[in-house]
Amino acid sequence: MIKPFAVFTLSAFALACTSALAATGTYQGKALGHNAEVEVAVTLDNDKITNVQILKNFETPAVSELPKKVIPQMIVDNQSLKVDRISGATFSSMAILNAVKDALKKAGVDPQKYMQGSRIAYKVSVPTKTDSDVVVVGGGGAGLSAAVAAARKGAKVVLIEKMSFLGGNTVLAGGALNASDPALEAKQKMSAGQRKMVEDLLKEEPKNEQQAKLLASLKKQWDEAIKKDPDILFDCPELHALQTYKAGDYVADLALIDKLSKLAPATVERLDKMGLKWNDFSSQYVGAIWPRCHDAANYTSGQGYIDTFRHTIEKEKLPVTILLQTKADELIKKDGRVVGVKATGPNGEKVTLNAKKGVIMTSGGFGANVEMRQKFDKLWGGKLGKNIGTTNSRAITGEGILMAEKAGAGLVDMGYIQLLPVTDPENGTVSGICQGTAIYVNTEGKRFVNEMGRRDELSKAALAQPGGVFYRMCTVKNARINKDGLTTLGIPVETFLKSGKVIRGENVEDLASKIKVDPKVLKATFDKFNDFCRSQGEDKEFGRPSCAPNIPMYEGPYYAELRTPSVHHTMGGVRINTNAQVLDTAGKPIPGLFAAGEVTGGIHGTNRVGGNAIADALTYGNVAGESAVK
């Protein structure tokens, strides 16, 4: 049992007269982590630390998993707080150590007592040579999807990840997965604006034969659906493909898009069979174009995908070996074929990974590499320097792209870099509580954009506002918070409220006063927006096509969160074909080399549709895994 005070063996008189007493008992301490305060309980026996228990931890699960597991034990085993931080999990590591220090202070013990001697590092070793059928480079959604797919086909798989945890950008994502799902989407009514979007698309002059075929197929399905019931929200893979093609300004490879849109529903079904629980409704994330986003029922989709693949590997006892803190350095080629990977292990040791069937690159893009952003940018006028934050993991630095290029891979669309308009101005993260397409209001209390538009259009409009910031607003009822009061990244909403990152107003006037906006202006903005939502008619101000049931601002309490654009996705990368084979500069497959996820280019064009990245990573990850085995 946790005690609020120490138990001493000396009398109260002796305690008063003694300056240094050995503490015995259990004490609680807390310290701020990346997301919220971490709380621990430290048990002492005559100043000896016998146990460290983590009571509360709202750090990103994948990132904090290893620190939670090893740091408390290292403290106990070594009777030391001079413990090195876990690579890639600095905030989580420091939060645990600082919380233990806080507990010691409350016990009347000087933490410096446990800071003597040499630093203690967490040691992990990996074999310097491995032989397998398939080597996967990168442990995010694409990599795990590929590993599971290959292993299910009987291949022996080794997956390497340079960080100390699995997840990549996937665990940091909101987690929407785009897939046409007529049964799910039929629960929504189709607005006049949405109907017009499809009709306008059908009027387009096709730019190639494949687009013509898709348009013809779409028209047939559309006519049948409208004849049957014109009020039900329509969708099909062809609409998904054509909207993606258009949103990327027609520069992407339509064959890749077509395969993605056709296979995405199977990806949803496959995850469902693996145990992922989906929401029973479709949503529309920021920049998603259409309400076909699938979410995990617990609102932790990004982490949910990683956990689902890991559990599948364990449950099915798949032949997948995972080597963490192992960084790929170079692809091994022999007689023109990629046959393995040279890497560096956790302690600097050189590692050789041989692959009989193939290597799959799933190492992500280069959103966290400022130098590469500046070098390749064609959209933002060289303004993507250090002053622009990123939603990406710090591990997403583009080495996989450069490694593949050195092995002969062709690159495509490298100049197209996407900003996400709705990120935290302080740290660039996507942490927040309002729906992606909720109402956007500038610091003057006015709407300024069609919130359901393309991400590049939204970002440009946001940067043009006073200070380059705006408020995304929602109500308590329609905020993305689960029944436990946690956000999509597992952070308590109370943490955001205490820090001021989310502002709550009981009514319009209360909210306006707290964000220093004229109440009359904000109320007029809400009233006009709500009139549009009720009528589902025409948004005469900005041309928003629809207003879903989880968007209106009919009644408080209200939330407001300050947002600004940050680097989110790099659309360029290695060129692949529909079998996820990496192509050389002449457009021919490089034997033994495959790729999936953000390390690839050619799927999204100039602008990625919201919800397509997860669909891309998990779908083409599966394709890559199966292709490598074949």
Image (cartoon, rainbow, N blue to C red):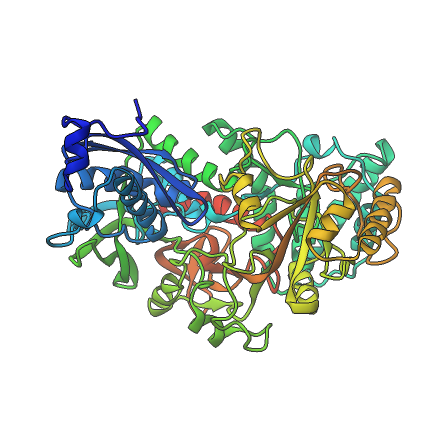
Q: Residue at x 13, y 42 (%)?
A: 78
- Where is residue 417 shown, x and y percent of the image? 55, 66
Give 68 or 221, whichever is nearer the viewer: 68
Give 65 or 511, whichever is nearer the viewer: 511
Residue 49 lies in what quarter of the image? top left
- Where is residue 116 shown, x and y percent of the image? 13, 52
Give 410 or 318, whichever is nearer the viewer: 318
Q: Residue at x 38, y 31 (%)?
A: 312
Q: Is residue 196 left or right of residue 598?
A: right
Quadrant for the N terminus, please: top left
Q: How many marks?
A: 0
Observer able to see residue 193? yes
Up-down relation of residue 256 to residue 533 (above or below): below
Q: Is residue 284 left or right of residue 509?
A: left
Give 518 or 196, whichever is nearer the viewer: 518
Observer able to see residue 49? no
Q: Residue at x 58, y 60 (%)?
A: 253
- Where is residue 296 shown, x and y percent of the image? 55, 34
Q: Is residue 520 left or right of residue 134?
A: right
Q: Residue furthest left?
A: 117
Residue 553 lies in what quarter of the image? top right
Q: Is residue 217 left or right of residue 534?
A: left
